[in-house]
Amino acid sequence: MNSLSVLVKYLDQPRLVGKFSKAVPAILVLGGAAVTYQHVKETPQKDKRKEFVKSLIVLGATITSALLAPKIALKITKSFSKSHAHTHNPHIHSSQLTTHCSHEHHHEHEHGEVINLKELKEEMTDLVDDFLSENKASAKTTQLLQKSKEKILNPSEIKTVFEELSENKYGKEGKEFLNKLVPNPENIDSKHIFGEIGRISILGLIPVLGGITGGMIADKATENNWKDRIPNKIKEGAYQYLANIFLCNIGAGAALLAMEKAKITSKAARATGMIAGIIVAGIVFGSAIANSIGKHIIDPIIKHRYRNNANFQGHMEIYSERKPEILDISLHVDDMATVAVMSGLKWIEPALPILYSISGYRAGIGYRNGWKVEEEKKAKFERILA
């Protein structure tokens, strides 16, 4: 068993994934507190109180929506799955429909459901006891299996258990047990690709909408010209969602579907193909597509621009094109997480709300390239008009 396999098995332990999920709220709150502290620290003394209130509201809305997003996304996709199944066969009884959907969308349960640690302990206890009652393992492995009922095994312990129980003397039963102890990553097939893309895309959309909403509430509470700030938030939200989330998911899904049709089953090849799809759809064309949608669809709807004035040199448009920056590119780490999720890895799933919260926050503050400079220009422009 090589080091990479050991690491994947270690990270994918259901108990470790469950504990990570429970830690996500604390991580988000601590991260939000750090961002607020740093922002207020850099703010001039006269504006500290106002900026503190704004940051508190924006981050509060973003974090809350990010924490609710997994349950909402799962509920929506499950409802759609049931509706889709019923539409294709209206004669299915409701009990049969539930069974059908749970079978057909097994991956949604694996990737979307929160792990109940109490129930997990009971399941692991039954699993280990049943196996040991019919199989004799070494004293060391038996001790580690007893430990696995309620504790996380470290990498060396994982290696010990898997190397022994995968030996021929344990046969098929040993391999089946190991797959239940730490389930193997499963390739998503063509039936589930776009269902999974839909769930992840909804999961990413909710924190962005939460950030925009929080930003508008914060501005209304602290700014007289709060309506003038709405377009920046909508424009940045559209940019974050399209360029950094949705189009990347589409690129990964399209690549995965193509490889499914080509009957490519290698996990490494599928992961490489999805990354290539993300680069093409999101990183290469995502910014251009997002800006084009903003310019030709969002701009005409909002119809909000800075006014021209002969006393102020230069024409400022709130809808200046958004160019990718270093942080935008680094945000594509969530796309690597998408690849991991679609490749069947479980440990990365709880991190998605954390990653998507960054996009939500930037939408909430109405970030644009050089936004601080633009805010200063706008304030100066408004003083001239006054």
Image (cartoon, grey):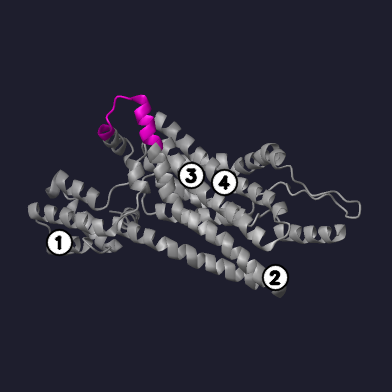
Residue visible at 25% across and 35% down in the picture: 95
Q: Position of residue 266 (x, y in %)?
A: 37, 39
Residue 83 covered by magenta stretch: yes
Q: Is 38 drawn above or below residue 189 in the view shown? A: below
Dot 1 alpha-carbon crowd within 10 angstroms: few under 14, some 14 to 19, many 20 or more? some
Drawn side of residue 295 relative to residue 360, left or right: right
* Disc 4 and disc 3 in contact, CB within 8 angstroms: no
Q: The disc labelled 1 sits on which kind of residue?
A: Thr
Residue placed under numbered mark 1 in the picture: 142
* Mark linked to residue 36: none
Quarter of the rendering occupied by the C terminus: bottom right
- Name the foreground residue: 82 vs 21: 82
Residue placed under numbered mark 4 in the picture: 241
Disc on the earlier residue, 1 or 4: 1
Residue visible at 50% across and 59% down in the picture: 63
Q: CA distance from mark 1 to mark 3?
A: 43 Å
Q: Closer to the observer: label 2 or label 3?
A: 2
Dot 4 alpha-carbon crowd within 10 angstroms: few under 14, some 14 to 19, many 20 or more? many
Q: The disc labelled 2 sits on which kind of residue?
A: Asp
Q: CA distance from mark 1 to mark 4?
A: 49 Å
Q: CA distance from mark 2 to mark 3?
A: 36 Å
Question: Tag 4's secondary structure?
Answer: helix
Q: The disc labelled 4 sits on which kind of residue?
A: Tyr
Disc on the earlier residue, 1 or 2: 2
Question: Tag 2's secondary structure?
Answer: helix
State the extent of the magenta-drawn residues as a range. 80-96
Residue placed under numbered mark 3 in the picture: 202
Drawn side of residue 292 relative to residue 251, left or right: right
Dot 3 alpha-carbon crowd within 10 angstroms: few under 14, some 14 to 19, many 20 or more? many
